[in-house]
Image (cartoon, rainbow, N blue to C red):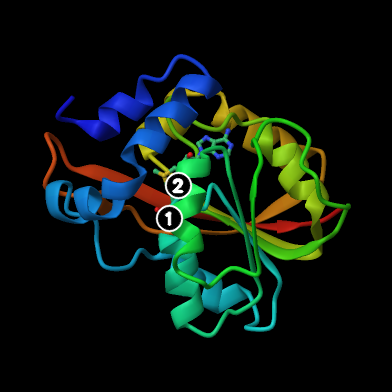
Amino acid sequence: MNNKVQWVYNSQNNQELAQRYNQWAQDYEQDLTETFGRPKREPIVDLTLKYVPKTARILDAGAGTGTMGQWLHEEGYHNLVGIDISEGMLAEAQKKNIYTELRPMVLGEPLDFPTATFDAVTACGVFTYGHAPSSSFDELIRVTKPEGYILFTLRPDFYESSDFKHKMADLEAQNKWQLAELGDKYKAEDKGQFTLYLQTWVYRVIN
Ligand SMILES: C[S@@+](CC[C@H](N)C(=O)[O-])C[C@H]1O[C@@H](n2cnc3c(N)ncnc32)[C@H](O)[C@@H]1O
């Protein structure tokens, strides 16, 4: 399979998704940078800097090989916990030595953390076709402290066509969270078959 991004999008279930990422883990970062043209750093880092203090305990949800964690670590965030469905991806993240804890966990299922554990949650590239479901937000809100932040990226076309738009609005209507900022559209991959755009959503947790 040449297009690994499409290959993981097409996963039929969590088991297949985890297996595909396990297989891709060792080449993932090089592939994304060289084959797909991933930028050196994505705007989610600057938005984290804008809203989240350096002392914050941050959950990197869908941490993968730890790219997001590395960007945050370079900025002085050193209290980072990572979770991912793929043990292969977590094994790569472990090599970076930047997380205080890395654990296999499945977004969309109950998370093994007490309520209000984290000051912030980040999820870069985790909510998309064949990946973590919109129901993941219920648990991410639960494990975030009131007034904490949840920052994540979404493809604008996926936001429009999936159930994410409805779920995000519903959580706002229920006063679970409030939109703090919607970042500009940016090119997250510009060397693949098509240019992939993403936007960063920043929510403040209320309950
Ligand atoms: C495109 S990668 C992004 C990884 C990393 N955040 C980054 O910015 O490079 C998506 C990651 O989300 C993880 N993932 C997808 N669905 C998940 C789920 N339901 N629960 C936990 N992790 C999931 C995948 O295993 C993969 O590591």
Pick the residue in front: 201 or 11.
11
Q: Position of residue 192 (x, y in %)?
A: 13, 40
For residue 132, above or below residue 51: above
Q: Position of residue 66 (x, y in %)?
A: 46, 60
Asked if marks 1 and 2 touch (Cβ < 8 Å), the reply is yes
Residue 153 visible: no
For residue 4, above or below residue 130: below
Is the C-beta of the residue carrying label 2 under 8 Å from the nearest atom of ligand 1?
yes
Q: Which residue is mark 1?
A: 92
For residue 204, above or below residue 197: below
Q: Position of residue 15 (x, y in %)?
A: 53, 21
The residue drawn where x is 82% and y is 51% is 113
SS category of the residue bearing label 1: helix
The residue drawn where x is 65% and y is 81% is 53
The residue drawn where x is 33% and y is 53% is 185
Q: Position of residue 155 (x, y in %)?
A: 38, 40
The residue drawn where x is 53% and y is 72% is 98
For residue 17, above or below residue 78: above
Q: Which residue is mark 2?
A: 89
Neighbour class for label 1 at 10 Å: few (<14), some, many (≥20)? some
- Dot 1 amino acid type: Glu
Neighbour class for label 2 at 10 Å: few (<14), some, many (≥20)? many
